[in-house]
Image (cartoon, grey):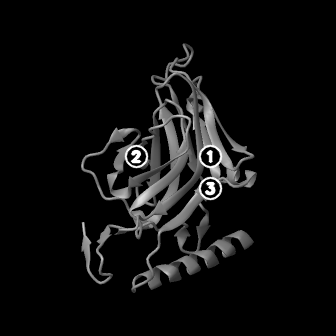
Amino acid sequence: MYGFLKRSLEAIKEGGSKILKANPTPWEKEQLLLHFNNAKELENWVIGSDKDIGGFSNASLDFMEKGFGKFHGNISIDIPKYNQELTRSGYAGIRSKVRGSSLFGVRCWDTSLFRYLAIKARGDNKKYFVNIQTDGPVLTDLFQHRLFLRNPGDWEIVLIPFRDFILTNHGIVQDPQIEMYREKVKTIGFSILSQPGSFCLDIDWIKAMNTDSTEGDWNIRPSPNDQEKI
C-alpha cells in the first residue's frame, strides 16, 4: 500500500509538471530515463530469449563496476526436434520494467518535449533494435528502430528521432502506421534477432534529448518567439 501511495504522489507531481509545460517553460536539453550507475538498477529490467519457449539462445544483463550494463549472451537459430510448436528461433532481448501503477494508472515517461531518444552504448558487429512500448490499447505493439552503432568496441551516443520509430506487432510492420504516443512511453528495450553466435551490447544511459536547435518537434530559430513546427 505504501508503494502504491508513493507512486500516486509521484504521478501527481509529474502531472503538475505537465500542466506547467502547457505554458511557456524554460527549454530543456535532456531528460534522463534509465541508467546503470549501480547494481540495483538491474532490478528495473526484464531479460528474455527464445530459451523461455524451448529454444537454445540465452541472455544475461550484468552490472559492470565502471558503471554500465552489459547485455550479452549467445544466439542459436536451432529448433529443438522435440518441440513441434516452435517454428522460429534466434531471439534475445531486455526491456525496462513498467514503473508501477498509481491512482492515475500506469506511470509513464512524457517525452513529447524532446526530439530524440538518445542512447550511450558500445556494441560489437551485431545488429540491434531499440524497442519502445507506449501505454496504448494493444499490449503487443512495439515501436522499433535499428540501433546504428558505427564503431564496434567504442562508446557512442546515438540520437534516434522519435518520429522515425516504426510500429510493429510481433515483429511485423503494421499498416497503417500511427504516431507514437510520446506522452505515454511505458517501457524501453533492446533486442537481437537471427544472428547466431555470441553478442555483447554495453549500455550506459538512455535519455530523451534535444539538440541546441530543437524543442520536441519544433525547430528553434534565433528568435525565441519565432518557431517552426516540422
Kindly identify the amino acid type of the residue bearing the numbered disc 1: Val
User: Pointer 1: residues within 10 angstroms few (<14), some, or many (20+)?
Assistant: some
Mark 2 secondary-structure assignment? strand
Question: At 48% from the left edge and 25% from the top edge, which residue is drawn?
Answer: 195
Q: Which of the labelled discs sits on residue 144, or is there none?
A: 2
Percent x, y of residue 230: 24, 66
Kindly check if marks 3 and 2 are in contact, taking CB atoms under 8 A apart as contact: no
Q: Can you tell which mark lies on residue 161?
A: none
The residue labelled by disc 3 is 35
Above or below residue 177? Residue 8 is below
Q: Residues within 10 Å of mark 2 (few under 14, many from 20)?
A: many
Farthest top residue in view: 81
- Which-is-in-front pick, marks 3 and 2? 3
Residue at (65% x, 45% y) in the render: 69
Q: Which of 74 and 223 is in front in this view?
A: 223
Of pointers 1 and 2, the one earlier in the residue sequence: 1
Residue closer to the observer: 130 or 64:
64
Name the residue tied to disc 1.
46
Circle 1/circle 3 CB separation < 8 Å: no
Tag 1 secondary structure: strand
Q: Identify the element where label 3 is drawn.
A: strand
Q: Give the x, y percent position of residue 84.
A: 50, 19
Which residue type does callout 2 highlight? Answer: Gln
Occupied quadrant, residue 64: top right
Q: Which amino acid does label 3 sit on?
A: His
